[in-house]
Image (tube, helix red, strand yellow):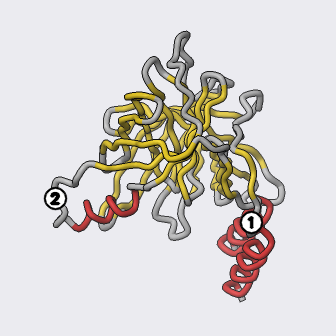
Amino acid sequence: MRKLIYIALILLSTYLLIGCTYEMKKVDNTLLSNRWRGEFIVQNRKVPFVFSLEKEQANVYGYRVVVVNGDQYEQLETVHMQGKNFRVELSYDQEDVLEGKINGNIINGKLRKRFSDSYLEALFTAHKSNDLRFTEIKKPTSIIPDGIWLLQYDTLKNLKNTADLFRHNIDRFESLQLFRKDNEIFGSIIPAEQGFEGVMTTNGFICSSFYKSEPYLMEGEFINDKEFIGTITTMTDIYTFKALKKSDSEVIVKKTDNIFSTLILLVKAYFEHL
C-alpha cells in the first residue's frame, strides 16, 4: 500500500509539471525570523549555507527544515527534535544526517554522509541571521556572466580508482547557467535542479550550495567575458575546470512545483513515524 501511494504521488506531480518554466530568481528571504546562516568546514574551507528550522503542524514530526540554494529550495520533513538537539534525515536510506544542538541563536553540529563503504563528517556552526551567505565587496568585476556555460575538466589522476571514477561521473556536470543581479550571482546546473548562490568578486565570483546532503563551494576567475577558470570543493574532492560561454540568452530553467514534492515528503514522514 505504501509503495502504491508513493508511485501515485510521483506520477501525479510528473504529469502536471512537465514543461513548467520560470526565470531564474532568488529564493532566499533574508528578512525571515527563523532564517539561519551556517558554515560547514570542508577541506579546510568555509562553505556557507542557508536554511530555516520551523514548526509545522502538517508534519507528523512537528518540524520542517528548508534549505535554500540560489533559485531552488529543498524541503526536509523528517526532523527529530529532542530538547535542544535535532537530527534531520537527508536521504531516503537514512544514511545521511544533519545533527545539531541549539543554544539560543547559535547551532553547533555536524553533517554525516555516506560515501561507498565509509562515512565522512563535516562540522558546522550556524547563527540566526539576516546576512547574505557571502559578504559583498565594494568593487567587484564588471563582467556580466548571464547565460549558459560549458565546462571542461582536468584529467583525473587515477581513472582506475573506482571511487574516484564514480565521483567524477556524478559530480562533473557539463553545463551551468549563471545569472547576475547587482553584486550577487546565482547558478543552476543543467539538467539537475541544483542551485548555487554567492557574490561577485574582484576578478570573478564565489558561490555555494548544500544539495542532496553535500556542501559545494564553487569559485571562478574570469579570463575574459567568454571564459573563466573554476574550482569546486566537496567533501571528497577538489577539482578545477575551464568554462566557455555557449549562449548569452535569457536564463530559463525547468522547475517542479514544491507543493507536490511536499505531499510526497509528508506522506513518507507519516509512514516512517508509524
Mark 1, other Cα within 10 Å: few <14 / some 14–19 / many ≥20: few
Where residue 211 appears, as percent x and y from the top left, is 53, 51
Q: Mark 2, mark 1: which one is toward the viewer?
A: 1
Residue annotated with mark 2: 158
Residue at horizontal 69%, vertical 84%? 2
**Relative to 98, is 32 above or below?**
above
Whether residue 77 is visible, yes or no, is yes
Amino acid found under the numbered disc labelled 1? Gly
Neighbour tally class for label 2: few under 14, some 14-19, many 20 plus, Cα within 10 Å = few
Image check: 92 left or right of 242? right
Occupied quadrant, residue 183: top right
Residue displayed at 47% across by 59% down: 96
**Left-right relation of 102 to 225:** right
Check the image and report above or below for 203 versus 37. above
Q: Are discs 2 and 1 less than 8 Å apart at CB? A: no
Is residue 98 depicted above or below 70 in this figure? below
